[in-house]
Image (cartoon, helix red, strand yellow):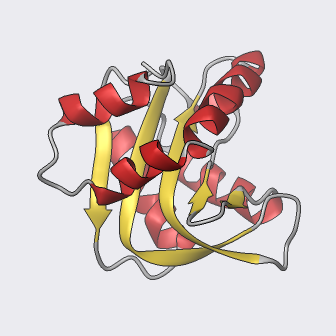
Amino acid sequence: MLNEEVFEMNVPNMKTKEEALSYLADKLISKGIVKESYKQAIIDREHVFPTGLQFEAYGIAIPHTDIEHVNKEQIALMTLKDAVSFYQMGTNDVEVPVRVIFMLALKEAHSQLTMLQQLMEVLQDKDIMERILSMDENTPNSEIKEVLALKNIK
């Protein structure tokens, strides 16, 4: 799931969730991981089914979309220098300031639940999340993968 190492850490100048989603989707598109249609599909789905989650010290988002937009499975990780506003999962009016985005490109619908469960283990681990938030553009991909592997995300 992390084979292509799509990690964008401490990205500056993102003003909206659409801008952040487009930026990360473009990285997946450029590597052939997802189809061109993925970007608009993920933005559209985020508007209908928000993916923001507020944890004690940080806000995260887990955007994903339908399998027909995906060529191969991948998790992309982006941290933002400054938070952008997403809506909380299950609402369309509760804002969550998000600095961490785990974008999922999944080929099978049933793998979504398993992946979300694994991600929740990462997201609920304050030490791991603090490490992720402290990483920047100079952090080696191997270190990012090592931290995620602590919770079996490989």
Residue 104 position in % (x across, y down): 56, 37
Quadrant including the N terminus: top left
* Residue appearing at x 50%, y 21% in the figure: 73
* Residue appearing at x 48%, y 57% in the figure: 100
Q: How many marks?
A: 0
* Residue appearing at x 64%, y 50% in the figure: 41
Residue 104, placed above or below residue 153: below
Residue 96, placed above or below residue 32: below
Which residue is nearer to you in this view: 129 or 88? 129
* Residue appearing at x 48%, y 20% in the figure: 72
Q: Which residue is farthest front?
A: 127
Which residue is nearer to you in this view: 153 or 8? 153
Residue 8 position in % (x across, y down): 29, 51
Residue 2 position in % (x across, y down): 38, 24
Which quadrant of the view contains residue 92?
bottom right
For the question of whether residue 82 can be seen, the reply is yes
Residue 138, placed above or below residue 17: above
Which quadrant of the view contains residue 93?
bottom right
Which quadrant of the view contains residue 38?
top right
Residue 149 position in % (x across, y down): 41, 22
Whether residue 77 sits left or right of residue 60 in the image: it is: left
For the question of whether residue 67 can be seen, the reply is no
Residue 17, placed above or below residue 15: above
Whether residue 85 sits left or right of residue 112 in the image: it is: left
Quadrant including the C terminus: top left
